[in-house]
Amino acid sequence: MVFDLDGVIYRSGPSGKKAVGESVRAIRALSKRKIPFCFVTNSTGSTEDEKAEMLSKILDLNIESSRVFMATSPMRELAKRYGKKRVLVIADGEEQSNKLATAFGFQNYVTLREYVKIRPALMPYWKKKKQIDSVKSTKTPEKISAIFVASEPNADWFSSLQVLLDIVTSNGETIEAFGGSVSDSQVVEIFFGNPDFSYPATHSVPRLTCGAFRTCLETLYYSTTGGRTLKSVCLGKPERHVFQSAFGSLVRQSNTPGDFDTVYMVGDNPASDIRGANRMGAPWESVLVLTGKSERNSKENPAMHVKKNVFEAVKMALNEHGGDVLE
Ligand SMILES: [Mg+2]
């Protein structure tokens, strides 16, 4: 079984993450029976190790990081592809940007503030606020080959949008470096970890996340270029890559490698969890739970099963496949 996290295993709020839907009982039931399981989340901002540690505390069960797949996990492979080429890594602040860029293995990256420190004219008001004085980096200007949005820049949307727009409308240099006009075509690739527009938190209305940030950039690009569409790649669910990685984890945990009657994807988001599992086809089956984003099955991306919560989903899976009945 494969589980989404936010809205399935826990919900996030001001006082931290709280388990929902009897998730502790559900995951312990699988662990006890040695049924392969893993987690696939579109949340970003942390490494797989950090996520596994947090999950272990919530579930009071040792969860290895090899069971955790995040929307940004494919960036490790992309870091190898870009090698020594200069890339810009955006996350929530300098500390997180440096942490994630290093964890993914980017060899030649700059953060937002490093990029602006080299080109202070891009952010006139930063100079006044001394926002770049604390940046110690001595990196020199280089053409940007790609942008990686590893997490939404929570406190820095305006500055991030301005700089990303500068780069995607250029040839990778700043616009000033090639004559002050907008490039005829998009040269710089841009990768987003999480495609989700919003996520369920303890507040009754979902909160904006990386997909909403992408929508802002697409709108600015459209207006600036006279109607062109920004080309970008999203790495998380519903794309196939992360489902294939999760399947690999289940195979490694199984005594009968790859020979699964059914792989259940349990999620709360029809557009990412359910759509992704439906697109994978057999043996994948989608299960929507009602503890997060959704109150009912979706018309656009209907789940094959709908259950009240994750415990009911696990109960159904065990009952359908000859396991002992959970009460
Ligand atoms: Mg979710």
Image (cartoon, rainbow, N blue to C red):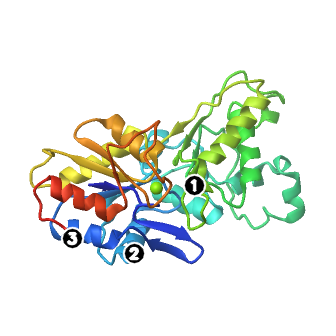
Please tell me whether mark 2 sits on a helix, a strand or a loop. Answer: helix
User: Residue 75 location, x and y as percent?
Assistant: 46, 47
For residue 282, side relative to residue 55 (left or right)? left
- Answer whether labels 3 and 1 touch (C-beta < 8 Å): no
At horizontal 34% and vertical 74% (from top left) the residue drawn is 59
Q: Nearer the viewer, mark 3 or mark 1?
A: 3
The circle on residue 327 is 3
* Residue denoted by label 2: 58
At horizontal 39% and vertical 65% (from top left) the residue drawn is 9
At horizontal 28% and vertical 35% (from top left) the residue drawn is 281
What separation in Å lies between label 3 and label 1 (alpha carbons)? 40 Å
For residue 273, side relative to residue 106 (left or right)? left
User: Residue 308 location, x and y as percent?
Assistant: 37, 59
- Answer whether labels 1 and 2 touch (C-beta < 8 Å): no
**Mark positioned earlier in the residue sequence (3 or 1):** 1
**Label 2, residues with CA under 10 Å away: few <14, some 14-19, many ≥20:** some
* Residue denoted by label 1: 151
User: Residue 127 location, x and y as percent?
Assistant: 87, 59
Location of residue 218 with respect to 77 vertically, above or below: above
Which residue type does callout 3 highlight? Glu
Which residue type does callout 2 highlight? Ile
State which quarter of the image contains the N terminus: bottom left
Residue 236 in view, yes or no: no
In this orientation, which residue lies closer to the viewer: 284 or 193? Answer: 284
**Mark positioned earlier in the residue sequence (2 or 3):** 2
**Mark positioned earlier in the residue sequence (1 or 2):** 2
